[in-house]
Amino acid sequence: MNTTSPHGWFKHAGLLAALVLTGFTTCAADELTGVMKKAKAAGTVYVGYRASSVPFSFVSGHGDPIGYSIDICRNIVAAMSDEVGRELTIKWVLVTSETRIPAVVAGDVDLECGSTTNNAERAKQVGFSPIMFIAGTKMMVKKGSPIQSFKDLKDKAVVVTAGTTNEKAIRELNEKFKIGLKLVTAKDHADSFSLVKSGGADAFATDDVLLYGLIAKNKAQGDYFVVGDFLSYDPYGITYKKGDVAMKKVIDTTFANMAEERELEQAYKKWFLSRLPSGDRINLPMSAQLDSVFRTLATKSD
């Protein structure tokens, strides 16, 4: 190549520029790891959702996943799209309380968007987003039930959803206080609710917000009541592949940005204070603890 003529020099310079840009692009692509790298290559993100974790993750009348957690996850996927430089499509994967953690561990879902409690045991298996909600285990009973607290559970059938922290809490409570209750497990929250409705169980123990959500979804206010003291406290989060540093950064940044822009607060009002698609409301004001969490997250985006 003749680099002494202006024409030759410009051609050479153009080639060098193209090579440099290609090099930068290649380096940028090489920097992507884990789920981010897989998502860029496939153009898709596999998102786990629940069938009946109202109002976090449930199915609309049209069969589409909707809810508080789903809205947050859509924001995370949008941030992932910006990061990889292409629009990513969501592929929805139905999970249950029992299958959600194994699905994340196996890589069958990239984000699990439901109502999953962050505890030490689970944190050994999956990564957790910042806290998005704080709940606690309570019981739901039919109108007229004599059950008002765990002290009334002797010889009573208590249903829990398999694979939940509530199952563990009730087992430990039963052993510690020698209550003598009969523990029944169901596949998902809707099945647990149905057992109480049909008389197959005397009480359903799970997170208080899920109980209020199920009552609202089934238009059953006045027929079912949430009773008793909190039997456990459970912070919720979005789960993802443990050790995936790139995903952690995107998720943490998304939460911080949503907190700063008050989008987390808006999402909360939408799903906990406004009318659900069913037409009913949960009417659960944000707790002081969760408000504090969101305020702290907002400062991290500065």
Image: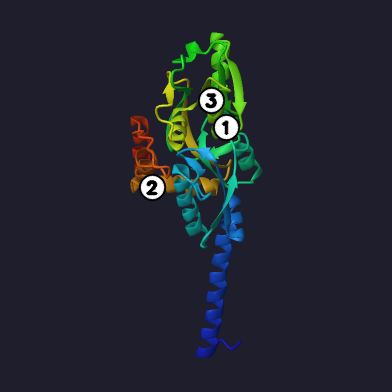
Sequence order check: which comes first, mark 2 or mark 3? 3
Q: Quadrant of residue 215?
A: top left
Viewer-proximal residue among 90 and 2: 90
**Residues under labels 1 and 2: Cα distance?**
34 Å
Locate residue 145 relative to residue 2 in the image: left or right: left
Give coordinates of residue 210: x percent, y percent.
47, 32
Residue drawn at x 44%, y 43% as measured from the top left: 68
Locate residue 115 relative to residue 298 in the image: left or right: right
Residue ID for mark 2: 258
Give coordinates of residue 186: x percent, y percent.
60, 29
Residue drawn at x 44%, y 15% as measured from the top left: 148
**Mark 1 nearby-residue class (10 Å; few <14, some 14–19, many ≥20):** some
- Label 2: element kind: helix
The vertical placement of 224 against 110, above or below, is above
Amino acid on which the number 3 mark rests in the picture:
Val
Residue ID for mark 1: 191
The vertical placement of 56 against 206, above or below, is below
Amino acid on which the number 2 mark rests in the picture:
Met
Disc assigned to residue 196: 3
